[in-house]
């Protein structure tokens, strides 16, 4: 393999691992991502890490900070409200298109994706951090539900929005009890019944629940990075307005 091929392979690996760490909550909102530290941790060059972080910046999971470097994207109530508004508009359309155009193979994929999600442990220990497997299964379930829309561009947009929402979803979970299995089952059942109105309503309630949980409990800053002397456990953190 050429040097360029090797670097691309290494960059893809670092990208996947850092992305998973962000979406699972191991890297917290606002936390600085030191290129030198990641380079040593993954045993790759600084340029390989920068390529991976630039790719995550394009997905809006990481932001470039002038004079500092890279950091995990911050959370805010204003951004959350905008994200939910856009998700509802786009994902509702994608779901309606999927119900209209999806075939039997698509239905089978939904059942399989839901089975994997329902049988994948969400957390592995008392830390409350989401497991990589659950984050992946959750992302795939939502992606498959919308994959029948017959538009690759629409699927790319909805997957990107879902990934951005994962940051908020992860921090909302300790704030209030929630029946995620029931929410996912309701979305699947309505979708497989080809009831577009009920399916969109279930998806809307699912998306809005994260926003409502955070908004109603926004009493402490949840975006404090690890190591901060002001850091608090997730259930005591507050999102900035």
Image (tube, helix red, strand yellow):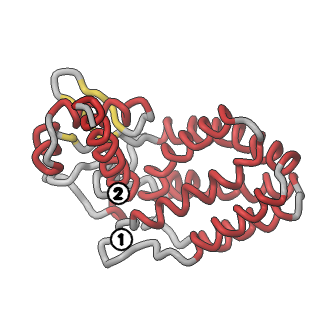
Estimate how packed mark 1 is, as few (under 14), some (14 to 19) or many (20 or more) residues with alpha carbons within 10 Å: some
Image position of 96 with respect to 216: above or below: above
Q: Which residue is mark 1?
A: 128
Tell me where residue 232 sits by quadrant. bottom left
Q: Does 151 sit left or right of 73 as displayed? A: right
Image position of 226 with respect to 69: above or below: below
Any part of residue 179 in sight: no
Q: Secondary structure at mark 2?
A: loop
User: Do the residues bearing badges 1 and 2 touch, measured as CB atoms within 8 Å?
Assistant: yes
Quarter of the picture holding the C terminus: top left
Residue that lies at the very extreme toward the top in this rendered image: 66
Tell me where residue 51 sits by quadrant. top left
Q: Which residue is mark 2?
A: 25
Quarter of the picture holding the N terminus: top left
Q: CA distance from mark 1 to mark 2?
A: 9 Å
Any part of residue 66 in sight: yes
What x and y, as percent, mark residue 46? 15, 33
Q: Does 159 sit left or right of 67 as displayed? A: right
Give whichever of discs 1 and 2 has the lower sequence position. Answer: 2
């Amino acid at each position: 393999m050429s040097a360029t091929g090797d670097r691309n392979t290494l960059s893809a690996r670092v990208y996947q691992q850092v992305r998973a760490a962000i979406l699972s909550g191991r890297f917290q909102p606002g936390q600085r991502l030191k290129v030198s530290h990641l380079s040593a941790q993954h045993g790759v060059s600084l340029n390989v890490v920068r390529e991976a972080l630039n790719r995550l910046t394009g997905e809006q999971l990481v932001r470039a900070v002038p004079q500092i470097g890279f950091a995990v994207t911050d959370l805010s109530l204003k951004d959350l409200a905008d994200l939910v508004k856009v998700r509802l508009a786009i994902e509702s359309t994608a779901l309606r298109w999927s119900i209209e155009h999806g075939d039997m193979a698509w239905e089978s994929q939904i059942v399989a994706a839901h089975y994997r999600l329902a049988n994948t442990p969400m957390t592995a220990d008392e830390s409350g951090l989401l497991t990589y497997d659950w984050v992946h299964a959750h992302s795939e379930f939502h992606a498959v539900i919308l994959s029948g829309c017959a538009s690759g561009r629409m699927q790319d947009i909805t997957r990107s929005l879902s990934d951005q929402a994962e940051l908020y979803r992860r921090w909302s979970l300790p704030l209030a009890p929630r029946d995620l299995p029931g929410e996912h089952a309701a979305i699947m059942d309505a979708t497989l019944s080809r009831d577009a109105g009920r399916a969109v309503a279930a998806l809307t309630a699912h998306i809005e629940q994260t926003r409502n949980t955070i908004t109603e409990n926004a009493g402490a800053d949840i975006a404090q990075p690890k190591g901060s002397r002001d850091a608090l456990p997730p259930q005591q953190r507050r999102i900035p307005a």
